[in-house]
Image (tube, rainbow, N blue to C red):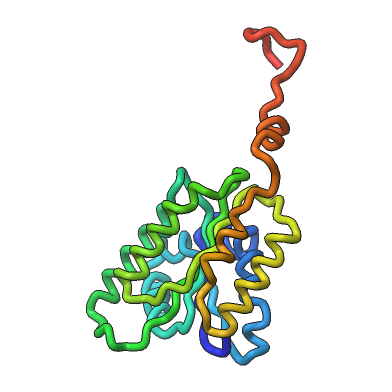
Amino acid sequence: MNGRTLILVGSPKGVERSDLAGYARSVTGGFEHQGGTLDWIHLHHALAVEDSIDDLLARADVGDLILLVAPLCADSLPAAVIAAFERIVEARSHFAREVKAPGFAVLIHRGFVKPVPNSTAVDICRAFADAAGFLRFGAVTLGGGGMLGRRIGRVLEQARAALARGSPISSALRRRAERPIMPSWVYILGGGTPCRGKSPGSRA
């Protein structure tokens, strides 16, 4: 990718402390060596400052690729992401559709093992891309908190390779990412083992 990539970070933890920002770096690693530029915007901060919102809208108009990285919140996207979507759609409603549109790719992360509920968030992103006049460039949806193994690492590498070529992330790659990292019963057993030797009314 030798153009301008705008990375929208939808985690409240921001660019420096968010695991999602690390995943974004995995997906965009090497773009700068190909002559591209990376712009980072923390959506929670941008929405709090009007000048930052104006900057967000301006950068969205000149980017070649926009990558959203966001956590799943109650089977949807964080409120800051939805609010940013609304502002971008409103601003771009006056654009002529023949103007070159950037690609819009998505990386969504869910804390639980199964990433299936991410589909609602992906549908929202698709609707946003269409309303804003962006080109859909696919999505990677992850589950399992910070327990990302080699398979997910390879998925992110392949997503990076596709975007570097200017190609969308394939649906096959998304399906590969959505394979659970462990059986559900193992996750439930490890996370929900009851305390032993305590009566229901006793204090820990």
Could you tell whether 176 is left or right of 117 in the image? right
Q: Is residue 137 above or below residue 165?
A: above
- Residue situated furthest front in the rendering: 172
Please tell me which residue is depicted at 62% across the width and 83% down the height of the picture. Answer: 31
Image quadrant where residue 152 sits: bottom right
- Residue situated furthest bottom in the rendering: 35
Q: Is residue 193 above or below residue 65?
A: above
- Comparing 140 with 85, the one in front is 140
Q: Is residue 86 above or below residue 98?
A: above
- Residue 53 visible in this rendered orientation of the protein: yes
Where does residue 101 sit, x and y in percent of width and height? 37, 83
Please tell me which residue is depicted at 71% across the width and 17% down the height of the picture. Answer: 204
Where does residue 178 sit, x and y in percent of width and height? 59, 54
Looking at the rendering, in which quadrant would you find the N terminus? bottom right
- Residue 41 visible in this rendered orientation of the protein: no
Please tell me which residue is depicted at 52% across the width and 65% down the height of the picture. Answer: 171
Could you tell whether 88 is left or right of 186 in the image? left
Please tell me which residue is depicted at 36% across the width and 87% down the height of the picture. Answer: 100
Where does residue 123 sit, x and y in percent of width and height? 39, 58
